[in-house]
């Protein structure tokens, strides 16, 4: 078995494995139990891994790349990639959480997985409404 992809969350790995199995490729998710027990271990162990047979490796890489290139609702304004995610925890909220304060603060930034740039969610909403 070869690792085809690694994810920080078990849900993402399970979705990728389900996508591969739906396309006829046997996929196995590993290290998901460790991350479910303590999510802080995700980066330490290299994330939750999706493994496939060596004979299906090229096809699995191709399928997973196609799904990442599909543009969804959010698109990076810098590179045009659909591989973007809303930042789940701002720096200020993380510091407050580490100090023991629980504040209802949400992040308003979006991070691109391809060009590694960050931009405010408000700017993306404005750009989306201008296109309509």
Image (spheres, rainbow, N blue to C red):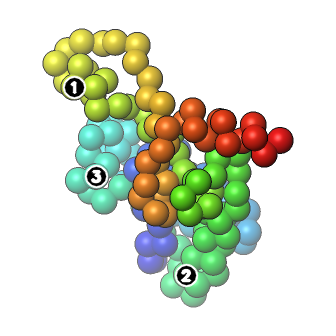
Q: Quadrant of the N terminus?
A: bottom left
Q: Secondary structure at mark 3?
A: helix
Residue that badge 2 annotates: 57
Residue that badge 3 annotates: 43
* Tags 1 and 2 touching, CB below 8 Å: no
Between discs 3 and 2, the one toward the N terminus: 3
Above or below — where is 58 with respect to 127?
A: below
Q: Position of residue 118 (x, y in %)?
A: 43, 48
For this orientation, the residue located farthest to the left is 99
Residue that badge 1 annotates: 95
Between discs 1 and 3, the one toward the N terminus: 3
Above or below — where is 107 with respect to 82?
A: above
Instruction: Tell me which residue sits at (72%, 71%) in the image.
Output: 24
Residue 15 visible within the image: yes
Q: Nearer the viewer, residue 31 or 68?
A: 68
Mark 1 or 2, which is nearer the eye? 1
Question: Quick check: 21 left or right of 118?
Answer: right
* Tags 1 and 3 touching, CB below 8 Å: no
For this orientation, the residue located farthest to the right is 132
Packing grade of label 1 (10 A; few <14, some 14-19, many >=20) is: few
Q: CA distance from mark 1 to mark 3?
A: 19 Å
Between discs 1 and 2, the one toward the N terminus: 2
Q: Position of residue 51 (x, y in %)?
A: 48, 69
Q: CA distance from mark 1 to mark 2?
A: 41 Å
């Amino acid at each position: 078995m070869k690792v085809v992809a690694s994810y920080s969350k078990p849900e993402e790995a399970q979705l990728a494995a389900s996508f591969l199995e739906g396309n006829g490729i046997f996929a196995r998710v590993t290290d998901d139990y460790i991350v479910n027990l303590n999510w802080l271990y995700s980066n330490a162990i290299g994330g939750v891994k999706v493994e496939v047979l060596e004979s299906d490796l090229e096809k699995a890489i191709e399928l997973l790349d196609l799904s990442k290139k599909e543009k969804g609702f959010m698109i990076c304004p810098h590179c045009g990639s659909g591989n973007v995610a809303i930042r789940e925890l701002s720096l200020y909220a993380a510091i407050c959480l580490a100090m023991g304060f629980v504040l209802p603060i949400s992040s308003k930034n979006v991070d691109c997985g391809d060009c590694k740039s960050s931009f405010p969610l408000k700017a993306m909403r404005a750009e989306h409404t201008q296109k309509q």
